[in-house]
Image (cartoon, rainbow, N blue to C red):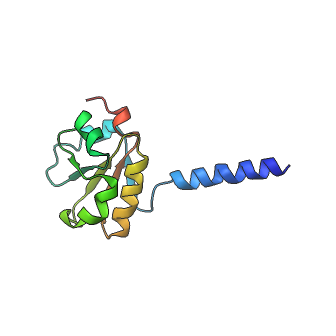
Amino acid sequence: MDGWILFALVVLFLIWRMKPAKGVRIISTDELKGVLNDKKVQFVDVRTPAEYKGRHIKEFNNIPLNELNRKVASLKKDQEVVVICQSGMRSLKAAGELKKAGFTHVTNVRGGMSTWQG
């Protein structure tokens, strides 16, 4: 019986960790294709420089997640920011950090580069 309680707690914790930060919009990579030409949108790839160098979408600037807090001033808080990573987990964390920093329009790309067909 105790095993089931522990299992349920672990599942609830994982669900809680994966839910988007309040106010973060989630889009698919297909939806991303329709936004890439929008010059008012800031595109940020939060993967490591090595991952970014290996394969990236040209509209995205590389600001690794571990540098985001230091480089957040280079982004405009009143413009939409679209964040991407390899799977969508680091970018979800980055989206939460941007919301806490006062950004109003933050979008995370679900599935990240692993689902990008471009």
Q: Residue furthest left?
A: 39
Instruction: State the quadrant of the C terminus.
Output: top left
Q: 53 and 107: which one is in front? A: 53
Image location of residue 98, percent across then percent down: 33, 63
- Farthest residue toward the right? 1
Q: Examine the rendered structure and indicate whether residue 100 appears above or below residue 40.
A: below
- Tell me, yes or no, if residue 105 can be seen here: no
Q: Is residue 91 visible?
A: yes
- Seen at 17% across and 39% down, the residue is 58
Q: Number of marks in the image?
A: 0
Q: 82 or 13, which lies in front?
A: 13
The residue depicted at 20 percent of the width and 53 percent of the height is 41
Q: Position of residue 74 (x, y in %)?
A: 18, 63
| Residue occupying image coordinates x 32% and y 33% | 116
- How far across and how far down the image is residue 37, in percent? 16, 43
**Up-down: is 77 above or below 86?**
below
Above or below, 81 relative to 111: below
x and y percentages locating residue 20 in the rendered image = 46, 55
Determine the residue positioned at 43% across, 47% down.
89
State the residue in front, 91 or 20.
91
Residue 67 placement, left or right of 7 = left
Relative to 57, is 101 on the left or the right? right
Outermost residue toward the top in this view: 117
Name the quadrant containing residue 60.
Answer: top left
